C-alpha cells in the first residue's frame, strides 16, 4: 500500500493565529507554539494584549525566517476579535489554524471569596475569547475546506486547578464542551477541533519563580518526574494543525507526564500550590 503523500506534518503555505502568543523568548506556551508552527512552515499572526508583547514574538519569528504579523487586542472583545481576524485574512489571504491559548488564571481564592468581577474576567478570556475567535475564523476555514482549531485547555478541566481557583477549573472544562461541539458542527467542512491539556509547564515565568528544588518537587508529582518543555506543547499543536491529523477531532489530549493517570483532588492541588509558592 502506498503512503498518502498528502498526510504530512508540514504546514507550508498555511496561516496560523495564536492568541496569547507574545513576549518572544520570555513568553510561555503561546510563544513556543508560534515558534513551532513557524518552523513547520506556517506564517503566524501573533496576538497578545499589547503590541509590545506581540512584536517581541514577531521579531523572534522573523529572525527564524518566518512570516509573522502582530495583532494585539483583547480576545474577550468580540468586535476587536472580528477586526483582528479580518486583518489577518487581508494580510495573508487566508487563515488555516487557530490556537486559542490566551488565558487568565485569576486569583487563587476559595469560591465563596470570588467576586463577580473575578468570575467575569476569567470567562472573558478563557471562554468568551475562544468562542469569539472560533466564530470569526470558521467561515473562512469552511470556504477553504480546511481548518484546525486547537484549544489550550488544562489538566484542571478533568481534575482541579493548581493555577487558579474554581473559575479557572470551570472555564477550562467548559472549553472542552466547546471543543466537542465544534467537532459536530464543523468536521464536515474539513475543520477539526481538539484540546490540549497541559499541566506543569516550564515556562520562563515559572522557572524564574521557582528555585531548582521547587521545580524538582513540582515535577516529581508526575510519573515522568519532570515538567513539560513549552515546545513539547508546541509540537503537539503542530501535529494537530497538520494534514496528518485530519481524522483526529473532538479529542482532549493531556500533556502532563502521566499526571492524569494518578488519583488526586484538593489534597494534591494544595501540595502543588505549596511547592509553587516556595
Image (cartoon, rainbow, N blue to C red):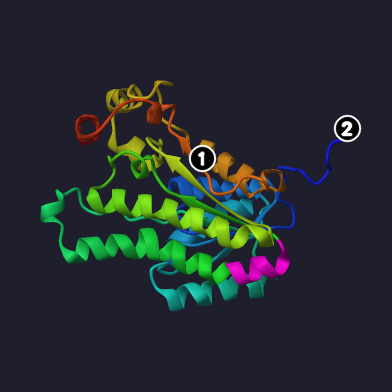
**Up-down relation of residue 260 to residue 151 (above or below):** above
Q: Position of residue 4 (x, y in %)?
A: 83, 41
The disc placed on residue 151 is none
Q: Which residue is mark 2?
A: 1
- For this orientation, the residue located farthest to the front is 184
Residue 278 in the figure: left or right of residue 201: left
Image height check: is 268 above or below 101?
above
Under tag 2, what secondary structure?
loop
Quadrant assignment, res 234: top right
Q: Secondary structure at mark 1?
A: helix
Q: Is residue 222 left or right of residue 251?
A: left
Secondary structure mainly formed by the magenta segment: helix
Q: Please state which of the two labelled residues, at mark 1 or mark 2, is closer to the viewer.
A: 2
Specify whether 107 is left or right of 145: left
According to the picture, the residue beneath numbered tag 1 turns out to be 233
| Contact? badges 1 and 2 (CB < 8 Å) | no
- Residue 94 in sight: no
Towards the viewer: 30 or 147: 147
Amino acid at each position: 500500500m502506498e503512503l498518502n503523500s498528502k498526510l504530512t506534518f508540514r504546514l507550508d503555505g498555511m496561516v496560523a493565529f495564536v492568541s496569547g502568543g507574545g513576549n518572544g523568548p520570555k513568553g510561555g506556551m503561546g510563544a513556543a507554539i508560534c515558534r513551532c508552527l513557524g518552523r513547520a512552515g506556517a506564517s503566524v499572526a501573533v496576538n497578545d494584549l499589547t503590541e509590545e508583547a506581540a512584536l517581541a514574538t514577531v521579531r523572534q519569528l522573523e529572525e527564524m525566517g518566518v512570516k509573522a504579523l502582530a495583532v494585539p487586542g483583547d480576545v474577550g472583545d468580540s468586535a476587536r476579535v472580528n477586526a483582528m481576524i479580518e486583518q489577518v485574512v487581508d494580510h495573508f489571504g487566508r487563515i488555516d489554524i487557530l490556537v486559542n491559548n490566551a488565558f487568565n488564571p485569576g486569583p487563587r481564592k476559595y469560591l465563596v471569596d470570588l467576586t463577580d468581577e473575578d468570575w467575569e474576567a476569567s470567562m472573558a478570556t478563557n471562554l468568551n475569547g475562544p468562542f469569539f475567535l472560533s466564530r470569526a475564523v470558521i467561515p473562512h476555514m469552511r470556504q477553504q475546506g480546511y481548518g484546525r482549531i486547537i484549544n489550550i485547555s488544562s489538566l484542571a478541566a478533568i481534575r482541579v486547578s493548581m493555577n487558579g481557583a474554581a473559575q479557572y477549573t470551570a472555564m477550562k472544562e467548559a472549553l472542552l464542551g466547546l471543543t466537542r461541539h465544534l467537532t459536530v458542527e464543523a468536521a464536515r467542512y474539513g475543520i477539526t477541533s481538539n484540546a490540549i491539556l497541559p499541566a506543569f509547564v516550564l515556562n520562563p515565568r515559572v522557572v524564574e519563580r521557582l528555585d531548582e528544588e521547587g521545580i524538582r518537587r513540582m515535577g516529581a508529582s508526575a510519573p515522568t518526574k519532570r515538567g513539560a518543555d513549552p515546545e513539547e506543547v508546541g509540537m503537539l499543536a503542530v501535529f494537530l494543525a497538520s494534514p496528518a491529523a485530519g481524522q483526529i477531532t473532538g479529542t482532549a489530549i493531556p500533556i502532563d507526564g502521566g499526571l492524569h493517570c494518578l488519583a488526586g483532588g484538593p489534597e494534591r492541588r494544595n501540595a502543588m500550590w505549596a511547592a509553587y509558592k516556595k
